[in-house]
Image: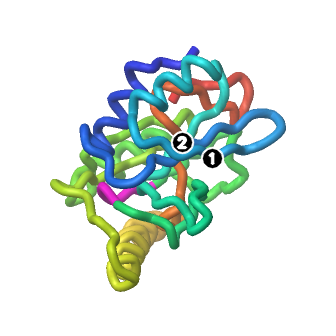
Amino acid sequence: MVYTTVARQHLEALFGNSTHGLISFSIKDEVAWFDQGYGEIDEIIKSIGNLGEKEYFIAPCTFHLNNDGHFKRQADLAFSMPGLWFDVDVQDQAHAQEALPTREEAEAFIVSLPLKPSLEIWSGHGFHLYWIFREPFIIETPEDRVRAQRLSRGFQRALIKEGASRGWAFDNTGDLARTLRLAGSLNHKAQPPVEV
């Protein structure tokens, strides 16, 4: 079951009532991965109702259409960045990586951060953390894109370094086209599926 009320809360926390660009909504099933761009949160919620229980992801950034007028989730088309994000995987059957914290250690790590996340989502096998800006970072020029990429990558490197000081190997998820799981959906990474 997909909890659309929870999904809406996640989307509104990131994108608010005003969307700059298209929200990347990704669907994963047994066969393929599909990316779609939506201008309105209501459209995404309606799609979830029509599609049912699949794996759903969103990108923290929004995107422009490409030169051909098509939607593509790629870093060079990022339009706005509403904040920063980080993925804290934990030790469990879904991860081959052994140098990860337990869930309890990850929770303690998050509490210890000097800058507390605005939004914390349990992905079923880790935590997706978001630090939401007061206003989205609008990417209007190539220089803006470079600044956004540097900010995201630098933030990720700082958290990865802090994790490494504790013996953990976190992934760098700072690319502007990154997707993270949508709250309220199901994570099928291991069986049985778990709620996000």
Please identify the quarter of the rendering in which residue 99 is found.
bottom right
Q: Residue furthest left?
A: 134
Q: Name the image colouring.
A: rainbow
Between 170 and 9, the one lying in front of the other is: 9
Please identify the quarter of the rendering in which residue 189 is found.
top right
Between 160 and 152, the one lying in front of the other is: 152
Q: Mark 2 and mark 1 in contact (Cβ < 8 Å)? A: yes
Going by the numbered disc 1, the residue's amino acid type is Asp
Rate crowding at label 1 as few (under 14), some (14 to 19) or many (20 or more) other CA atoms within 10 Å.
Answer: some
Residue at 38% in and 19% down: 5
Q: Is residue 73 left or right of residue 45?
A: right
Residue at 33% in and 73% down: 140
Please identify the quarter of the rendering in which residue 149 is found.
bottom left
Asked if residue 30 is positioned above or below residue 176 in the image, the reply reads above
Dominant secondary structure of the magenta stretch? strand
Going by the numbered disc 2, the residue's amino acid type is Phe
Q: Is residue 22 magenta?
A: no
Specify start and end residues of the magenta stretch as a single range. 81-86
Q: In this figure, which residue is indicated by the disc labeled 2? A: 25
Q: In this figure, which residue is indicated by the disc labeled 1? A: 35
